[in-house]
Image (cartoon, grey):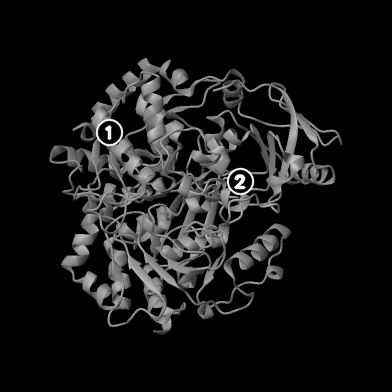
Amino acid sequence: MQPYTKHESIAALMNRSNVDTDQIIPKQFLKKVERSGFGVHLFHDWRYNDDGSDNAEFELNKPAFKGAKILVVGDNFGCGSSREHAPWAIADYGFNTIISTSYADIFYNNCFKNGILAIVVSQSQLDALMAEIAANEGVKFTVDLENRTVTTPAGNGFTFEIDPFRQGNLLSGLDDIGLTLKHVDEIDAYEVKHKQSYPWLWV
Amino acid sequence: MKKTMYEKIWDSHLVVDVEGQAPLIYVDRHLMHEVTSPQAFEGLKISGRKVRNPHSILATMDHCVPTKNRHLPIADPIAKKQIEVMADNCKENGLNLYDMKSHNNGVIHVVVPEHGFVHPGMVVVCGDSHTATHGAFGALAFGIGTSEVEHVMATQTLPQKKSKTMLVQVNGELSKYSTAKDIALAIIGKIGTAGGTGYVIEYAGDAIKKLSMEGRMTLCNMAIEAGARAGLVAPDEKTYEYLNGKEFAPKGDNWEKALAYWNSLPSDAGAEFDAVVTLDAADIAPQVSWGTSPEQVIGVNANVPAPESFDNEGKRKACESALAYMGLTANMPITDIKIDYVFIGSCTNGRIEDFRAAAEVAKGTKVANGVTAIAVPGSYHVKDQAEAEGLDKIFIDAGWEWRDPGCSMCLAMNGDELTKGQRCASTSNRNFEGRQGKGGRTHLVSPAMAAAAAAAGHFVDIRKL
């Protein structure tokens, strides 16, 4: 995983709530056995016309949002299926930051495993960010994870909360499994005890 | 201290809890299917790690498998490869796999209980959001992403944040026409699809106690549709009776030891929950979803809501766009909605009880002109049982297709899908845009409601049949 560094980037706006993982990456693209190459299918059913051409009506197809790394979106983003193909597609498309009022549980976890910072803001903060982008499409925000700040040209910046463990892992790009395996002795000891307490699980 | 069932399971599975790190919890059972596992096996291989406890894993093939002409090679080359990769990965790592040709094959969340692989008090994970199903046994069961699948294979643990607890109390008695599915939908209608976010739900009350194990599985299955991490029902005599004698259930002395443990699991009287929601079962009419989110649901006797009936801007906008996508008019009666397709099956409603309920309604009817109706058992064992009871004949005589098991039209990955504009009465769990095929329109209902719609060509209030 790439370490997350401070960056200034275009913020794209999707003013939609309850965007589900079936929309983020429709099921016909889940048959691949690799992790890469999902970006081209991100939001497929909204993004492309039936003939495969770009749907000019779809938000992310606006020229002003080209190259955006920040996605500003409505509440309960990523609900539905657990498919990690959703954050794979988001990251592969080029986003490394999402800003919303709320995320579905599994999706939120999946983001951090893939170097995506999912920032939670209040409704009024989100409304201000959305208004700023709508008034000035192509506007760039600066995200500083170390100091937990987002700054914007119109002064809608804020400090955000994040679990220090997740923050540390994103900043260092550390592998979760490696971290857990530092505790392998404790896992071994737990298993010995577990076998004594629940012998029927081990036959 | 008085503890909830969730807190008891959490405490007994805590392996490491140190400052500055997410707590590590132990995983007893790991379920797998072909769609969310290949990249995890690849990661394991690249890092030179091994599966820590192969015996904790049970795998099946369900999402991509065809539900007819199983004897032929899979036509879709990418699906075929995914199936082959699954078989190779399981073989290489010594895992128990019910492959497409196995008589134990079926939808993972239907197959696992059939073999008694999940018991009360376990922590159970799967790269699938509907893992919540197994909460019906009083196990903490939840969906994970593929990175976490790899993590569990390598370490048998997961870093987890402790959830808040929500008690959903369903009092009173359900009418004979309403089912666990209707309870699940009514709860989501009440609290919304994000209402359970951050919580583990415990379902309790007379109406829940009276549900069969199959019904409890249907209910817990949809906990994720309310945004919850997991759903739980306290284990009781029904749970024990269901498990007793199954392949992976404890035997002999171990059965007695397990029973003693299981009996200690229910929440202590007076244990506090972070939130409490109460419903009266008698108020729950057979439900029909009208929109593109499971929270957009209403009783069959009601009308499609109008955007202006919602008190907040977000919900008004969501209603407008759902009505446009679904091709419905505000205020039209639900029973005026005509359908093109009916699907009975899935990890929500693909169990024997579901086919019995549907067959009872389908018996002696004919599928309406222009309607296609398919019945897809959740497993070969469900299929066998249904055939032994003659249910297949009832469906076939009524003009239904009787298929082989798989996820099928619940997520339409295997070629069973709607075409643009087609409308389906479906016993599955999600009515998202395009879920059953691009441009397809899904209405979530119970099996009996689906069977009644198949015969009439539109939704009907089964209480009036």
Q: What residue type is labelled 2?
A: Phe
Location of residue B139 in the rendering, given as x and y in whole percent from the top left corner: 35, 43
Q: Which image quarter is the N terminus of chain A in? A: top right
The subunit letter for the residue under badge 2 reads A
Q: Which amino acid does label 1 sit on?
A: Asp
Location of residue A60 in the rendering, given as x and y in whole percent from the top left corner: 69, 45
How packed mark 2 is, by other alpha carbons closer than 10 Å (few <14, some 14-19, many 20 or more), is many
Q: Residue at x 40, y 59 (%)?
A: B409
Q: Residue at x 56, y 34 (%)?
A: A111
The disc at residue B122 is none
Q: Which of B415 and B50 is in front in this view?
A: B415
Give the side of residue B449 with respect to residue A5, left or right.
left
Where B400 sits versus A15, above or below?
below
Pointer 2: what residue?
Answer: A77
Q: Residue at x 40, y 81 (%)?
A: B369
Pointer 1: what residue?
Answer: B88
Helix, strand, or loop for circle 1? helix
